[in-house]
Every structure is written in C-alpha cells, then in structure tokens.
C-alpha cells in the first residue's frame, strides 16, 4: 500500500505548531493558585432613568458608567442602585452616572449596594468640560440606610462618579499626545486585544539600539476604578520622556522601558468594580494566563526579552487603595536589583518634603504581577499604590520624584 503525503497539509501543521510554540509563555508557579477561568458577568442595562413626577433623570449611557437602577424614595430623594459585574468581588463599589432635573433644585441620592458591600469612594463631580471637583464633605451623609449625598441639579447633566473617569479613549488621547515629537525614542504599538476586542497598547521607550538593554516594565489599570495609580503612572512616564533631562537621556541610553497604560480596557469602559470582561481579577492571572489581556502581555514581554537578549530587572504595577503604600517582595538577595528598594525609598524620603514611605513587604503567594516579576524573572517587583483621596498635586510630585530617583539609582547618579 502506498502512503500519499499532502505536502500542503504538512506545511500547514508545521506552521500551526510553530505559531503555537511562539505564543506559549512560560507558566509561573505560586503557593496559592487562583482559578482565573472566565466567569459570567452581569451587564448593566444602558438607559436613561426617568422619575417623571418629580422631573429628575439619570443615565449610564457612556463609557465608564456604572448604574444598575434608579428609583424614587420621596420627592427629594432617589435610590442609586449599584451592583458589581459578578461575585465574589472586593468591597470597593464603583459608580458613575449623569443626573439632571427639569428645574433647579437640591436633591438627595442614596447609594444602595448589595449586602456586605460598602461605600468607598468620595464622589467626584463634573459638568460639561469643567474640571473635576470633589463633593463638599458637608453634602455627604452616613446614616443607617447607608451613604447619601446632596447635589444641586438643573437641566445641565452633572456627572457623578467614584473617581475621575478615564476611559480607554481618554487614555489613548493621553499617550498619543504625550509621544508627539518623541517618536525617535518612543515606539507605540498595539500588541493585542482584550476579550471584547479593545486595543492593548504599549509604549516601548529607549535610545539607540534595543539589543542587550535591561528592561523595566510599568503596568497600570488592571483594576478599572484605580485612577490615582494611573495618575502616578502618567507622571512617572512623562518624567522618563523629558526631552530636556540629561538624566533621562542617559537612562534611556542604558535601559529600555515597556509601559502598558491600560491593562484592562474592557473593565474600564464597562464600568466594572474590579474585573475584566471575563469576570476575572487580572491581577490574579499572572500564572496560568487564562485571560487574553495577561496572556498577550506576558507573550509580548517574553518575546521582547528573547529577541533582544535582554533581561527584565524591575517591574512596577501602579494601583490605588485607601492610602499610599508600596507592596514589595521580601526576597531580594540574589535578585536583579538586591538593594534597589531600600535605596529608592531612602531617596524618596530625602527628596519629597515631609514624605514617609509606607512599605509592606511580603512575598507574593497568589499570582499577582509583583510575584511574576520575582518568580518568573528573578526581578524586583513592586505594587505601587496611591491613595484614593491623595491630593492630585501630591500625586504629581510622587510620580515625578519616584521616576527621577529610579533613573538616578540605575545610572549611578
């Protein structure tokens, strides 16, 4: 019996095997595994809610909105119903909606969350193209029924949100404008797409040749509402890209930075409390890479390292929490930068007036990014957290100085 071999089929199979091997990223083991397979999410219904008899309206028809229900309590108060994308989830209820009325009036909004979930974020307010401003504390009330706010309404829609809204479009506008005139040392690329097809961008920053340059990775917006960490990331990246800084020029002659400005664009635009469109906390997926955002990020970093014979030496993941804090790994001896953390923190305290570093060391047991940097690359990893209510001018100072001192330490300045 003769065996006939279809050459085109063999080539197709070999090509598939080659492609699969190129896309496979090395898994990293953690002490406590987390199931990051996709889970069902509950989509909010986009609509305008109408309380016709009292002439008050609310809607969630914009990117970054979160409003699951709106009902009248009495003639001066409405319930704002906020639910998470799925459960279990952390107790950090995110909300964002627009409200207006037929005639000018004072009006009360009572936030209602599922059992065991509490109000976290101080409301931020915005009208049209005006600047965001925090609600005056005299207009926020804590009662047995929960959190209530008093707002002045009129015919112009007022945006009321847990934090300033920075949708994927806002983020794109920011980095597009940031790199204008800097194309000689910043390469913008889209290395993948989210579960729902939104772009995953990266800023690839270096001078000269990328060959053999050690790499620093910067991440942000794994958790959608955590914009204060994103603000610090912005100032950090802007400082690295300063054309007039000799420190920046020397740093980029020696190092390469991969900056990922929006790791979870679906969650951001869908107004999620924490998860992506797969219903998963992406900062628990740095082991099995079951979610497309993390899988493609890891593949991109791995491919970049291999292609240029480079080493990943430092990873900073920008987040937000109730207060400023740096989560670090205790394991430092024998890593890429064994003394970086203590030198960096000392430099911050010496260069930011009245600033005391709040550090919480502990080796990552669950599959988070700072553990992936350590266990996957023997690199220094830090979860860089900014407080929800940290003043925005202070965030600028912290973001700028942390970048400056990092560059000084890594260039021996």
Image (cartoon, grey):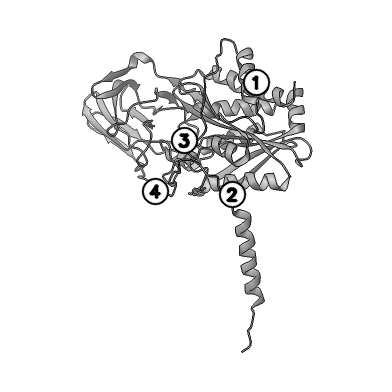
Instruction: Report the residue marked by disc 3.
Output: 224
Q: Residue 39 carries which label?
A: 4
Split into 4 quadrants, where in the image is the C terminus? top right
**Mark 2: which secondary structure?**
loop
What is the quadrant of residue 400 in the picture? top right
Q: Where is residue 274 in the image (x, y as percent from the top left)?
A: 43, 37
Residues under numbered marks 3 and 1 in contact, where contact means CB atoms less than 8 Å apart = no
Give neighbour class at mark 1: few <14, some 14-19, many 20+ (Cα, 10 Å): few
Which residue is at 66% across, 70% downward?
11
In this rendering, which labeled residue sits more in front, label 1 or label 4? 1
- Relative to the observer, which residue lies in front, 48 or 391? 391
Mark 1 and mark 2: span between their CA atoms?
31 Å
Q: Residue 53 carries which label?
A: none
Q: Position of residue 70 (x, y in %)?
A: 28, 34
Mark 1 and mark 4: span between their CA atoms?
42 Å
Q: Residue 343 carries which label?
A: 1
Mark 2 and mark 4: span between their CA atoms?
24 Å
Sequence-wise first label, 2 or 4: 2
Give neighbour class at mark 3: few <14, some 14-19, many 20+ (Cα, 10 Å): many
């Amino acid at each position: 019996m003769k065996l006939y071999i279809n050459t085109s089929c063999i080539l197709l199979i070999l090509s598939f095997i080659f492609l699969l091997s190129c896309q496979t990223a090395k898994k990293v083991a953690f002490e406590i595994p987390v199931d990051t397979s996709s889970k069902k999410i509950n989509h909010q219904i986009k609509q305008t809610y109408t309380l016709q008899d009292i002439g008050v309206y609310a809607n969630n028809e914009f990117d970054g909105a979160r409003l699951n229900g709106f009902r009248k309590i009495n003639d001066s108060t409405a319930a704002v119903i906020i639910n998470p994308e799925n459960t279990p989830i952390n107790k950090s209820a995110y909300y964002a909606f627009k409200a207006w009325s037929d005639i000018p009036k004072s009006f009360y909004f009572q936030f209602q969350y599922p059992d065991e979930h509490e109000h976290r974020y101080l409301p931020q307010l915005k009208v049209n193209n005006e600047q965001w401003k925090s609600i005056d504390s005299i207009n926020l009330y804590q009662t047995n029924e929960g959190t209530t706010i008093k707002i002045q309404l009129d015919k112009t829609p007022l945006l009321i949100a847990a934090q300033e809204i920075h949708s994927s479009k806002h983020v794109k506008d920011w980095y597009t404008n940031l790199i204008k005139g800097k194309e000689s040392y910043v390469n913008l690329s889209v290395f993948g797409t989210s579960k729902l097809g939104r772009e995953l961008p990266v800023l690839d920053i270096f001078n000269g040749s990328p060959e053999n340059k050690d790499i620093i990775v910067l991440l942000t917006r794994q958790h959608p509402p955590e914009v204060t960490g994103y603000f610090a990331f912005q100032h950090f990246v802007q400082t690295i890209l300063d054309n007039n800084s000799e420190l920046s020029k020397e740093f980029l002659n020696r190092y390469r930075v991969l900056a990922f400005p929006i790791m979870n664009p679906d969650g951001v635009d869908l107004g999620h409390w924490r998860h992506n469109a797969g219903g998963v906390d992406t900062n628990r997926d740095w082991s099995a890479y079951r979610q497309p955002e993390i899988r493609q990020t890891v593949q991109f970093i791995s491919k970049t390292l291999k292609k240029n014979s480079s080493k990943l030496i430092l990873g900073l993941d920008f987040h937000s929490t109730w207060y400023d804090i740096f989560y670090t790994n205790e394991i430092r001896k024998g890593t890429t930068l064994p003394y970086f953390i203590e030198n960096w923190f000392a430099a911050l305290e010496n260069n930011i007036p009245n600033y005391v570093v709040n550090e919480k060391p502990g080796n990552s047991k669950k599959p988070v990014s700072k553990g992936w940097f350590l266990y996957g690359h023997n690199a220094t990893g830090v979860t860089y957290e900014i407080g929800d209510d940290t003043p925005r001018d202070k965030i600028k100072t912290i973001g700028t100085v942390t970048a400056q001192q990092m560059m000084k330490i890594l260039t021996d300045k």
